[in-house]
Structure formats: C-alpha cells, structure tokens
C-alpha cells in the first residue's frame, strides 16, 4: 500500500478536524510546522515536523520524523547525532536541473525524501524514480489533490512510495487513503471443467479495447453471474485473417459481469472510455487497465457452462466464433467454438453476492 501523509500546515481552523480524520483513517503520517500540532497525536500515526527556512528547535518533543530543507547544507547524519531517537529526512523543491539532481541524490541516499515538483510535468519524477530504483528509502511526493495523487502513484508503473497532500476540506484524508489503498490484490484462480456448450442465437457482445498491451497469458474475467467467471484471453495470439489486437478482449455478452477495483463488478455494457477494468493473468496476478473503447455489436452467441471441483457452476456467454478464446491451465488458449465437455478452463469464484456491483452478504439467487 502507498504511504499517505496529510499536511495540516495552512489548514487553519480545520486542522484539528483534519487531524482527527487522519487518525481515524489510519494515514501513515501527519505533517506540520508546529510541534504543538504533533504532540497531541497518538503513536498510531507518524508525526512529521517539516522545518523549512527556520532554525531547528533544540527540543523536538512530539516529532517522530523531522524533514529539513536540503538547501540548509546540514546532513541528516549530523542532525541524528545531535538528536538521538529522532528520524530525519530531506525536503527538496525541484525547480531546475540542479535541484533535480539534489532530489535524485536524496532519493538514493536518504531514509525519507520529500519532493515538491513545481512544474506540472511528471518527467522529473520519472527521472528521480529511475535514479533511485534500487534505493531502500521512501520517496514522498507532494500532490495538490487526490487526482494528482493517483497519477503520482502510477508513474513509471511503480510510482512514488507515498504522497503528501494538504486537504482543502474534511474528507480529503479519507479520499487520499482510498486512492492509496486502491492497489489490486491478486486472485486465486481455479480450474473449471466444461460441462455444456450450446448455441443460443443472436445477441449483443462487447469487445473491450484498452489503452495498454495485454500479455499472451492475460485477459479479463467474465461471467453471467457474480459468483462464477471465466478468464477470456486478449487478442494477442495470431489469427489467419486479421492482425492481432493485443489491446483487446472479445469479452462476452453485454449482461456479463467483469471485475473492477475494490471488489466491485461492472456489466460489460457499463464500461466506458476512460474507465477501468481488471486485467488478470493465468497466475492470478492483477492490474487495473484503462478502457479506451467498448464495441458492442450483434453477433451469434455461445453459452458455456463449467463447474468447479466443489460443484460451483460458472456460465459464460460469448461470441460464437473460433477466434474468440478463453484460457486454460498452462496458458493454454482455447477457441470458443472448439470447447467441449471435459475441457478445462480457468476461472474465478467470488463468494459475495452483489448489489449495484458492490459485494454484500445477503440472500441472492442467480440462475
């Protein structure tokens, strides 16, 4: 999970409420330039004293971590020797090549480096992350809002270790925490035995085109019910009559469920350009990918039933055409029109029922 630092400097009368919310949301740190703010915080949150431009107090009671401006020229080792029991980190404001190099050095060598990029481009952050790829310290980047924080979390696919944000209102800490925890957990896929395959006539199916390339062992999970889904492979494998489209999954009929973040499901018909969908590979590794387009067209459809060893049935309705494929064990690619009883496909069996896409413990029967 990414680190969340809440900056209460300049929040005025809201500071107390924001600190209470931050503690309740279990953010990783609260940042202030006033030790009196920090001393009232419980030990469940890291208390960060940001000392910019002023002399460091002799008494740092209330601070777990003190972040000092690199421009002061004093090393964190010297500070730690003078203040045993307190951690130290470095703040760098990046405005030119010299301060960018200072940020790279801090990220490589310091336990904590707090970076403040004044230009809107994320290229300097990419440079710092690349320079510190093997470093053990934590890189915290200032974000103006939650939307920017989400971008920072994803830069160079790895992102900054954390974000410092000053909420404009109560609720900001909660939203930042949600953004930081929106990492997609891996899934436990299961082997399902095909029991029945039937032509079911015409209907609308959805091709999900994304803004990324899928791997050959990767696709999205699709199912007619929320408790049984089959792994539909992307169009990364060669076809004799058309070029490969490794950004696409010919997914299934429009009523079908697929997975999104935070355990949420969407109907394929609900996906829109700019939204997101969960990509899954045959080992159950997951990532969120951005939807670029959803193509819904009328096509002949095929219904496939498959059962788990425990007897849970999954149904998938997909286009009745041999170039539409699902994945089996060992990365085996199976054409939909060649599926037959006894074949094995990979699937996922959520245990929760769904209400407007969210998991919920209630009675729900799907058939």
Image: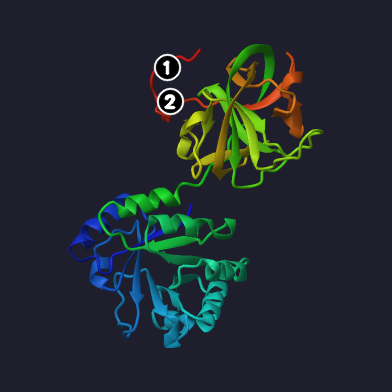
Q: How many numbered marks, from 0 up? A: 2
Q: Residue furthest left?
A: 13
In which image quadrant can residue 232 be found? Answer: top right
180 is higher (above) or lower (below) than 298: below
**Which one is in front, 51 or 313?**
313
| Image position of 175 (left or right of 313) | left
Which class describes the residues within 10 Å of circle 2: few (<14), some (14-19), or many (20+)?
some
Q: Judge whether residue 283 can be spotted in this image.
A: no
Q: Residue at x 42, y 17 (%)?
A: 364
Q: With 254 as the anchor, is 191 left or right in this view? A: right
| Vertical order, 143 against 68 (above or below) | above
Task: In the rendered structure, find residue 364 and report the number of the disc placed on it.
Answer: 1
Q: Position of residue 17 (x, y in %)?
A: 22, 56
Q: Are marks 1 and 2 in contact (CB under 8 Å)?
A: yes
Return the residue at label 2.
354
Q: 309 or 93, which lies in front?
A: 93
> Residue 9 placed where, x, y %?
28, 69
Give the number of the disc on residue 184. Answer: none
Q: How far apart in space, not on screen, are marks 1 and 2 (Cα)?
A: 8 Å
- Rendering coords of residue 208 (x, y %): 59, 36
């Amino acid at each position: 999970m990414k680190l969340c630092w809440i900056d209460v400097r300049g929040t005025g009368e809201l500071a107390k409420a924001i600190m209470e919310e931050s503690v309740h949301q279990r953010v990783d740190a609260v940042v202030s330039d006033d030790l009196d703010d920090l001393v009232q915080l419980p030990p469940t949150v890291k208390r960060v004293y940001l000392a910019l431009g002023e002399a460091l107090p002799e008494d740092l009671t209330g601070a777990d971590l003190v972040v000092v401006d690199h421009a002061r020229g004093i090393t964190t080792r010297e500070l730690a020797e003078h203040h045993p029991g307190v951690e130290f980190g470095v703040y760098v404001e990046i405005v030119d090549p010299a301060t960018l190099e200072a940020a790279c050095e801090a990220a490589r060598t310091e336990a904590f480096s707090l970076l403040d990029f004044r230009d809107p481009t994320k290229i300097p952050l990419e440079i710092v992350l690349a320079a510190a790829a093997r470093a053990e310290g934590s890189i915290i980047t200032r974000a103006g809002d939650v939307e920017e924080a989400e971008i920072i979390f994803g830069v160079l696919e790895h992102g900054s270790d954390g974000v410092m944000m000053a909420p404009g209102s109560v609720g900001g800490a909660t939203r930042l925490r949600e953004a930081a925890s929106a990492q997609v957990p891996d899934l436990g896929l299961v082997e399902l035995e095909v029991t029945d395959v039937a032509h079911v006539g015409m209907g609308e199916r959805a091709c999900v085109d994304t803004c990324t390339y899928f791997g050959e062992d990767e696709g999205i999970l699709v199912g007619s019910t929320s408790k049984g889904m089959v792994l539909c492979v992307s169009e990364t494998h060669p076809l004799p009559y058309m070029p490969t489209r490794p950004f696409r999954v010919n997914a299934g009929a429009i009523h079908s469920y697929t997975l999104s973040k935070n355990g949420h499901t969407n109907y394929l018909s609900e996906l829109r350009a700019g939204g997101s969908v969960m990509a899954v590979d045959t080992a159950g590794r997951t990532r969120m990918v951005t939807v670029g387009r959803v193509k819904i067209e009328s096509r002949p459809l095929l219904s496939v039933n498959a059962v788990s060893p425990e007897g849970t049935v999954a149904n998938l309705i997909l286009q009745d055409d041999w170039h539409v494929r699902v994945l089996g064990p060992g990365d085996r690619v199976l054409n939909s029109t060649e599926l037959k009883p006894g074949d094995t496909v990979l699937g996922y069996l959520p245990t929760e029922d769904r209400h407007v896409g969210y998991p919920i413990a209630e009675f729900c029967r799907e058939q």
